[in-house]
Image (cartoon, rainbow, N blue to C red):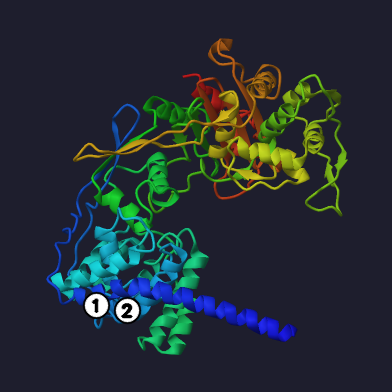
Amino acid sequence: MHRLTWIGKAALAVAAAAVGIAAVVAGIVPHLVDILRAHDQVPVELPGFASLARETNVYDSTGAQIARFRLEHIQEVTLEEVPEDVVAAVLAVEDKVYWRHKGVNLRSLVRAVLSNVSSGSAGQGASTITQQVVKNEFLGGFARDGRYKVLQARYATLLEKKITKKEILERYLNTIYFGNNAYGISAAAEAYFGKPVQRLTLVEGAFLAGMIRSPIGYDPIRRPERSRARFKVVMERLADEQLLDVAQAEDLGENWQIPEILRSRPGEAFSPTYFSAAVRDFLLQDSDLLGDTVQERYNNLYRGGLSIYTTLDPRLQRAAEDARLKKLPANAGGFDTAVVSLDSKTGAVRAMVGGGGFRPGQSEINMALRPRQTGSSIKIFILAAAVQAGAVGSDIIDGRRGCVLPNPGNPKEPFVIKSGVAGKVGPLKEATWASLNCAFARLSQIVGLNRVVDTTRRMGVTSRLDAYASFATGANEVSPMDMASGAQTLANEGVHHDPYYVERIVRTATGDVLYQHEDPGTAALSVDAARRTTSILTGVLKRGTAARTGWLSGGKRPAAGKTGTQQNNTNAWFVGYTPQYVTAVWVGNPKGYVPMVNIPEFVKVGVRTVQGSSFPARIWKAFMDV
């Protein structure tokens, strides 16, 4: 009986599925008929191809231009100029029946439409090259619902009646995005291989073809392991299409040297800066302000003719750069600094220094956005969580060194702190000023590590955080941007605003406002908790670890903040704020965790061991005192 019941249920499920599929098929058949007939119809008037040359200008908060994105270096190539092997590789990867279909691969389309109509999304792929051209050129503003694929397919069929396959493929190769600002196969050849497209080999062309599906996901510079895995798949595809034999494909997949550096950086007319690069990467990779896909976003940024108004304050930017130059010794053995300053009320990014200088293809690591261990600067968030839970500065806490605490990350081994400042049993505010590790390790467990992590996230830290006993000693890695973002919540009396670069985006030709920044903020802490936390942190500059830094403007401008020095002096921090600005400063080695002890250039200026109270605090004060 049990077996029959199971069979009956299975039969009902199959029947229901069949009915569902039949309904879906019935719904799409009329569309497929339209697609089949489209090639025999007089084509509707499709929009013309967009120009390749409309530039986007970027402005600072005063209206001065700071960047321009345009395809000034693009070299449109004819199909005859692209080696036949390269064309064959692209077709093998992207559309192996390109020369045989009429814009749509119907077998793949039916499979995609069935999936998309059933799910209500447009997740299933199977686009031909013609469909990709249609998507990139004509469908940027269309909703990605279950009908999208049908519309895309119909347009593709009509397009193939309007122009030749050669023209479509030529347009595709000249406009497809290959990552790292390489727009079109000619720019990609220069960017990744330092050669004109005419000299590309089959394997180089295949590598580029493999990037088309996900130019950011398969970026060889930033994601070499994923790029290698994708290249192996592409080599298998070439073997399947008999462009390589199996042994060759396997050998190349394992051993061929994928590009490790960029040979050129096309498309940026102004000298790029850390800020302009951050704006570019945000618009292309981290937001949908310019479109749903990377290709759409790239089209809009480099071909859309936009005016982008940013948050950068040129006066503060100069001050940040000057503070770095004046307070950190030159040629400091590979050590450098990062500075991020936000508007305390809004989260607007007012200044950004990511290191010693932005050099495309060579030095593009923006340390303002790179997570590093924080040392004691993380205590800001433990203190805020404790005060939010009801703690006050006069509460007594045990700060004596040599503490042994439970370790949720590894219950079998307790967490032991032997280093750091030797403290005593005393008020929480004094433990904060002296930055006592044992006091804050105990406090984090009294409050609850999960609550501390949750508070830290609500205050604006997006970096990965582990609720381990080592949280209090700064073992988690957090970027300067995130540290500033979290402190902004305190500076703004408990209301958090995410950091942002872009105030508004305007279509230059029409004046249409495409985007206007709005953020009402989120109450992460109570006003009282934020004020009481700030009151304690002002003591760090008056009588604590940053007492030598002093208040701003000769004591006329109170400020709050926290120093941070990671174990072995590998990272040093100062994070501080006023009601106007919140600024995070990091000092360390961009290449790794290198101790900053007895560095000759630092010893010459009286700093034998770099701590948060030395260069970071000095840079912070020099910047904030403008």
- Mark 1 Cα-neighbour bin, 10 Å: few <14, some 14–19, many ≥20: some
- Determine crowd level at label 2: few under 14, some 14-19, many 20+ residues with C-alpha closer than 10 A: some
Q: Position of residue 20 (x, y in %)?
A: 47, 73
Q: x%, y% of residue 14? A: 55, 80
Horizontal side of residue 98 vs 45, given as left or right = right
Say which label, 2 or 1, has the lower sequence index: 1
Q: Nearer the viewer, mark 2 or mark 1?
A: 1
Looking at the image, residue 92 sits to the left or right of residue 335; the answer is: left
Lateral position of residue 510 relative to residue 580, left or right:
left
User: Residue 106: which disc?
Assistant: 2
Task: Identify the residue at horizontal 67%, vertical 31% (top origin).
Answer: 380
Q: Is residue 350 above or below residue 569?
A: above
Name the residue nearer the viewer: 478 or 73: 478
CA gap between label 2 and label 1 equals 9 Å
**Which percent across, then down, holds residue 438?**
81, 35
Residue 196 visible from this viewpoint = no
Q: Are marks 2 and 1 in contact (CB under 8 Å)?
A: yes
Residue 177 in which image quadrant = bottom left
SS under mark 1 = helix
| Residue under the image location 29 percent in, 65 percent down | 151
Q: Is residue 558 above or below residue 609?
A: above
* Residue at mark 1: 36
Label 2 element class: helix
- The amino acid pointed to by label 2 is Leu
Amino acid type, label 1: Leu
